[in-house]
Amino acid sequence: MDFPTKYGPWALVIGASEGMGAAFADECAQRGLKVAIVARRADALAEVAVGLRARHGIETREIVGDAADPDFSEKLEAAMAGLEIGLMIFNAGIQPGGPFLRIRLEDHLKCIQIQCVAPTKVCHWLGRQMASRGRGGMVLVSSGAAQQGMAHWTGYAAAKAYETILAEGLWDELRDSGVTVTSYIVSSTYTPNFQRVQEKHDLPFAKGVDPADFPEGTPLPSLPEVVAAALFPQLEDGPRLYPTPGDKAGAEAGARLPRAELVAAAGAASKLYFPSGLNELDA
Ligand SMILES: NC(=O)c1ccc[n+]([C@@H]2O[C@H](COP(=O)([O-])OP(=O)(O)OC[C@H]3O[C@@H](n4cnc5c(N)ncnc54)[C@H](OP(=O)(O)O)[C@@H]3O)[C@@H](O)[C@H]2O)c1
């Protein structure tokens, strides 16, 4: 089956008003799919949609929605009624950062709602439709943080681990019905969201990622367009995909470490983000 036959006619990209989500939407449009994009900011969505139509001449639909809303999935289903969705990419996420006990409980719960409850409901709704049609795909965007416990992103890492394991199980359950499900595990990526956190905490990439500004060998965040493009050639090679062979090799090397060593190493890196112990959402 060619790409639009297996994954068309509509792609639904959740969390697509900027950065990586917008880049996923562009990749779908480039492959001949109509694209529905979802996020909280109507103006940013409209801007992305204008670009998609201008570059690719495809049909778009913009849906304002908040994945933290307990009825998010039901509202999305109503907004997409009558349209056949062949590919869903769940990209929206929040990253409450800082010591677990200093983050408001409501923010931990919101993180679970967005990255556990909402993907579960959307996969249940769309998985049934896709399985009955015998084709389609669902991608849950996860994080390197999902691969072990991670201090100061403890709740985030746990929520992303759920998202990854959900995708892996569905990959196995649905593959015989022609539906491709995968976890896409991305590492540091220079999205506007990433850049805002860097700026807020005056971190090294606050002003940009020009290699000329950093000592040779400094690991730089990836660019969102590069990460989005890297998904599609390997889409059918799940259950767990990475943007680069280096990301995959790093994850596999980490998994071979004694668990305490791995968790401590991940925490040593994440604690650098919050040296003052500030809660990112409260600060
Ligand atoms: N950037 C990184 O370094 C990195 C590293 C590892 C994993 N990831 C994962 O990659 C994904 C995207 O990364 P990102 O956030 O940096 O960049 P992004 O894709 O550039 O932006 C996130 C998108 O999600 C939307 N969104 C956020 N909260 C939402 C909500 N509650 N409901 C609906 N839409 C929502 C945002 O738009 P609105 O504000 O308009 O809603 C925005 O369009 C996330 O799942 C993240 O956990 C990122």
Image: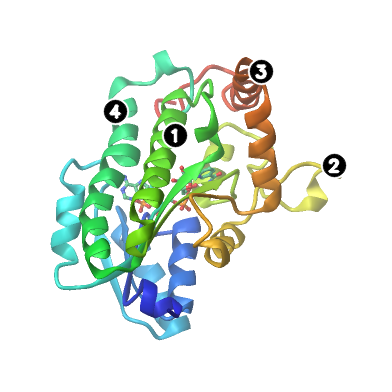
Please tell me the numbered disc located at residue 234: none
* Residue 41: image location, x then y, percent: 31, 56
Instruction: Confirm or deny contact between disc 2 and disc 1 (CB under 8 A).
Output: no
Nearer the observer: mark 4 or 3; the answer is 3
Mark 1 and mark 4: span between their CA atoms?
Answer: 15 Å
- Within 10 Å of disc 4 (Cα), the crowding (few <14, some 14-19, many 20+) is some
Circle 4 SS class: helix
Position of residue 132 in the picture relative to residue 248 (left or right): left
Q: Residue at x 85, y 42 (%)?
A: 215
Residue located at (71% from left, 46% from top): 220
Disc 1 or 4, which lies upstream in sequence?
A: 4
Disc number for residue 161: 1
Mark pair 3, 2: CA separation = 27 Å
Q: Which mark is residue 261?
A: 3
Label 1's element? helix
Residue 3 rendering spot, x and y as whole percentages? 44, 77
CA–CA distance in space, label 1 to label 3: 18 Å
Which amino acid type is marked by label 3? Answer: Glu
Q: Nearer the viewer, residue 208 or 272?
A: 272
| Residue at numbered disc 4 | 109
Which is nearer the N-term, disc 4 or disc 3? 4
The local crowd at label 1, few if under 14, some if 14 to 19, many if 20 or more residues have their Cα within 10 Å, is many
Q: Tell me what residue is drawn at x 45 percent, y 83 percent.
A: 56
**Where in the figure is residue 6, as x and y percent of width and height?**
38, 74
Circle 2 packing at 10 Å, graded few (<14), some (14-19), many (20+), is: few
The residue identified by callout 2 is 215
Give the number of the mark in front: 1 or 4.
1
